[in-house]
């Protein structure tokens, strides 16, 4: 089972990019395990990226930020002297645009810490196999790591300061990382809005990279009063354990009870249901209303859980009576499901490129002409609240 099934399957080292664009991406690896440091350093080189250094603890990693100005830092959570959680804000204070990806093993504690690190400014996390042997043999872990370096490194390398410019000394710690420089807009065509709107009976959300922070912010913006009117069903690409902790964070943030969906559970208004990591979450008609269906089928779009599975079932169960949004994430999961929902008459919204960590999933929906609006995160909350309540935005 994929640890974090949000990226394409692994490519062999011979097919990895060795172009100048890849070489321009500068990477720092910080992990207390010599085995992990050595393996990841080798993978970085084989993929054509530039390894600027490795660090066995957070203190050394912070010092290397000042010396080498990396684009991407692969940062372990548990390290001696200075752990990843403490090192992260110091790194961002010195280099606000550096792209920090947290690495942790699959434990409830580490999942909680990883999600808190996203709130502090880390761009993503990756789940490590629990043993050195697991790290050595996991092609999926390698593929996910390289894909994150490629995506985040390319974005940061385009805005990196000139080589002659000094790296600033530490400043007061920001709450979150500074926003990246504006990106050129990608062309797309909006789907015409339906004049007569069916009152939504469910809010559907699909997200991946950058999603945990985006989902929480958007739901908080919609507000508890509107969220109590209908069930919220979320597919966030995450490994097991992480999805349960993610649900707990949503409960705290929104005041609405959130939990992983359970087999044959009847969905109710005023509840948030999160697809469990490693299982597809769909819907079916039950004797007293729609129920959750969990399956262990093959990955869809290389993902399990997959957004398409939920969306396609929702198109059958709810028809036009949905409000749907695709948030930040790699890949194109959700596009086929969004087409099924629009064919059923339901509205689909997408997060815009400027506020997305990665404009893969929402960009795919937008370019397919399936979104009736492509909006910044804060405006998505306003638009969805208006749909749910029937009040003007």
Image: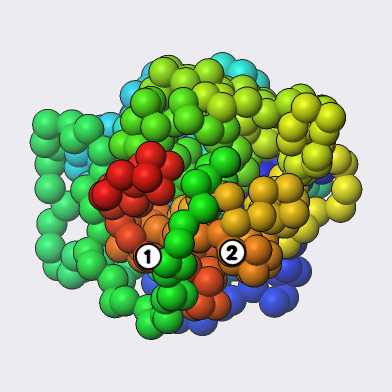
Taking 56 as reference, is 20 above or below it?
below
**Disc 1 on helix, strand or loop?**
strand
Is any part of residue 143 visible from this angle?
Answer: no
Residue at image coords 52%, 45%:
200
Where does the N terminus fall, quadrant-wise? top right
User: Along the horizontal axis of the image, is 170 left or right of 114?
Assistant: left
Q: In terms of depth relative to the viewer, which is nearer, 241 or 157?
A: 241
Q: Residues within 10 Å of mark 1 (few under 14, many from 20)?
A: many
Residue at image coords 33%, 60%:
375
**Which mark sits nearer the N-terminus, 2 or 1?**
2
Taking 237 as reference, is 72 above or below it?
below
Residue at image coords 53%, 71%:
370
Is any part of residue 365 visible from this angle?
Answer: yes
Q: Position of residue 274 (x, y in %)?
A: 62, 33
Taking 88 as reference, is 187 above or below it?
below
Q: In terms of depth relative to the viewer, which is nearer, 264 or 387?
A: 387
Q: Position of residue 93 (x, y in %)?
A: 20, 38
**Can you name the residue that lies furthest to the front here?**
196
Query: Image quarter for residue 217?
Result: top left
Residue at image coords 26%, 58%:
180
Q: Which residue is mark 2?
A: 345
* Scheme of image coloration: rainbow
Query: Image quarter for residue 90?
Result: top left
Taking 377 as reference, is 373 above or below it?
below
Q: Position of residue 19 (x, y in %)?
A: 51, 81
User: Along the horizontal axis of the image, is 169 left or right of 143?
Assistant: left
User: Along the horizontal axis of the image, is 179 left or right of 229?
Assistant: left
User: Along the horizontal axis of the image, is 175 left or right of 258?
Assistant: left
Q: Nearer the viewer, mark 2 or mark 1?
A: 2
**Which disc is residue 374 wearing?**
1
Q: Residues within 10 Å of mark 2 (few under 14, many from 20)?
A: some
Q: In terms of depth relative to the viewer, which is nearer, 284 or 183?
A: 284
């Amino acid at each position: 089972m994929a640890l974090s099934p949000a990226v394409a399957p692994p490519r062999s080292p011979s097919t990895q990019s060795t172009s100048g664009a890849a070489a321009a991406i500068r990477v720092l690896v910080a992990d207390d395990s010599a085995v992990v440091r050595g393996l990841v350093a080798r993978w970085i080189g084989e993929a054509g990226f530039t390894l600027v250094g490795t660090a066995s603890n957070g203190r050394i990693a912070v010092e290397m930020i000042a010396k080498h100005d990396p684009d991407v830092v692969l940062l372990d959570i548990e390290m001696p002297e200075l752990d990843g959680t403490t090192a992260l804000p110091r790194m961002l204070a010195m280099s606000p645009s550096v792209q920090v990806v947290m690495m942790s093993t699959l434990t409830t504690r580490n999942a909680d810490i990883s999600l808190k690190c996203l709130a502090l400014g880390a761009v993503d996390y990756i789940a490590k196999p629990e043993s050195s042997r697991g790290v050595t043999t996991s092609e999926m872990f390698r593929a996910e790591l390289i894909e994150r370096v490629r995506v985040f490194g390319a974005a940061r390398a385009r805005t990196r300061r000139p080589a002659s410019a000094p790296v600033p000394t530490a400043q007061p710690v920001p709450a979150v990382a500074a926003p990246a420089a504006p990106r050129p807009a990608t062309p797309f065509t909006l789907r015409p809005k339906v004049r007569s709107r069916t009152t939504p009976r469910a809010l559907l959300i699909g997200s991946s990279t950058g999603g945990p922070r985006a989902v929480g912010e958007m739901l908080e913006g919609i507000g508890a009063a509107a969220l109590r009117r209908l069930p919220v069903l979320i597919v966030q690409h995450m490994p097991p354990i992480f999805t349960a902790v993610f649900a707990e964070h949503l409960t705290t943030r929104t005041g609405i009870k959130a939990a992983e969906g359970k087999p044959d559970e009847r969905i109710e208004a005023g509840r948030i249901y999160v697809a469990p990591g490693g299982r597809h979450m769909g819907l079916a008609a039950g004797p007293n209303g729609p129920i959750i269906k969990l399956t262990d089928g093959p990955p869809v779009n290389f993902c399990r859980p997959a957004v398409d599975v939920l969306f396609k079932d929702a198109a059958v169960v709810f028809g036009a009576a949905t409000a749907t949004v695709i948030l930040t994430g790699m890949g194109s999961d959700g596009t086929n499901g969004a087409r099924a929902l629009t064919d059923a008459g339901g509205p689909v919204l997408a997060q815009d490129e400027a506020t997305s960590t990665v404009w893969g999933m929402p960009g795919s929906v937008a370019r397919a002409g399936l979104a009736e609006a492509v909006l910044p995160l804060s405006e998505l909350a306003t638009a969805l609240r208006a749909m749910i309540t029937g009040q003007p935005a």
